[in-house]
């Protein structure tokens, strides 16, 4: 996925070297000690960096999320249906939120109603909207309000 999102940045050899250096940083966590391709950033750092990039480098943010969404839409992704849907929704939401152009509460409520009416993928969307990098966005607020209403 790294080379799919950042295809122009580095030559193949440089990309592998940069990736190897990146995953050795103390804020990168290996999700499965027996596999070399599942990593995550510590949540606080990820949230702070994401907010900064989303607002201050919105075009870059949009490009990377669009590339990630295209990659996840391909048939080469080894994820379960729920995990794949959640990842796709995350990148779609993140793309929509680029810069200071948040589509607003009404937009996300309408998206949620469509999912609810369709009866599919609602939990995947809610999980995506609760991602730490989207914490203070209208999408996260709508997801939280929906879950509070549902729990009553």
Image (tube, grey):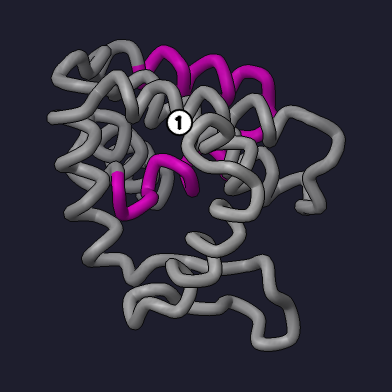
Please give the name of the residue rendered at 65% of the width and 47% of the height, measured from the top-left corner: 12
Q: Nearer the viewer, residue 43 or 35?
A: 35
Please give the name of the residue rendered at 38% of the width and 22% of the height, measured from the top-left corner: 62
Q: Nearer the viewer, residue 143 or 26?
A: 26
Whole-percent x, y for residue 87 in the image: 58, 43
Whether residue 17 appears in magenta in the rendering, the answer is no
Q: Residue furthest right?
A: 75
Task: Count residues near mark 1 (Cα–Cα under 10 Å), then give few for <14, some for 14-19, many for 20+.
Answer: some
**Relative to 19, is 98 on the left or the right?**
left
| Magenta-colored segment: predominant secondary structure | helix
Residue wearing tag 1: 64
Whether residue 119 appears in magenta in the rendering, the answer is yes
**Relative to 49, is 39 on the left or the right?**
right
Asked which quadrant contains residue 104, the reply is: top left
For the record, the magenta segment spans: 108-133
Please give the name of the residue rendered at 34% of the width and 82% of the height, measured from the top-left corner: 26
Whole-percent x, y for residue 107 in the image: 33, 12
Q: Residue furthest bottom?
A: 33
Whole-percent x, y for residue 73 in the image: 72, 28
Asked which quadrant contains residue 119, the reply is: top right
Please give the name of the residue rendered at 29% of the width and 58% of the height, measured from the top-left corner: 46
Q: Tag 1's secondary structure?
A: helix
**Relative to 142, is 137 on the left or the right?**
left
Whole-percent x, y for residue 23 in the image: 48, 72
Q: Nearer the viewer, residue 105 or 101?
A: 101
In the rendered image, the vertical position of residue 82 relative to residue 21, given as above or below: above
**Relative to 106, is 86 on the left or the right?**
right
């Amino acid at each position: 996925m790294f080379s799919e999102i950042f295809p122009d940045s580095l030559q193949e050899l440089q990309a592998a070297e940069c990736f190897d250096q990146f995953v050795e940083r103390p804020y990168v966590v290996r999700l499965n000690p027996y596999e070399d391709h599942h990593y995550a950033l510590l949540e606080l750092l990820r949230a702070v960096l994401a907010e900064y990039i989303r607002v201050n480098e919105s075009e870059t943010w949009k490009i990377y999320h669009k590339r990630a969404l295209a990659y996840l839409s391909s048939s080469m992704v080894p994820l379960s249906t729920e995990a794949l849907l959640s990842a796709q929704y995350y990148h779609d939401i993140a793309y929509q939120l680029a810069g200071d152009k948040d589509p607003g509460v009404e937009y996300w409520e309408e998206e949620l109603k469509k999912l609810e009416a369709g009866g599919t993928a609602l939990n995947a969307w809610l999980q995506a909207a609760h991602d730490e990098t989207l914490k203070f966005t209208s999408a996260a607020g709508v997801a939280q309000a929906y879950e509070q209403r549902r729990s009553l």
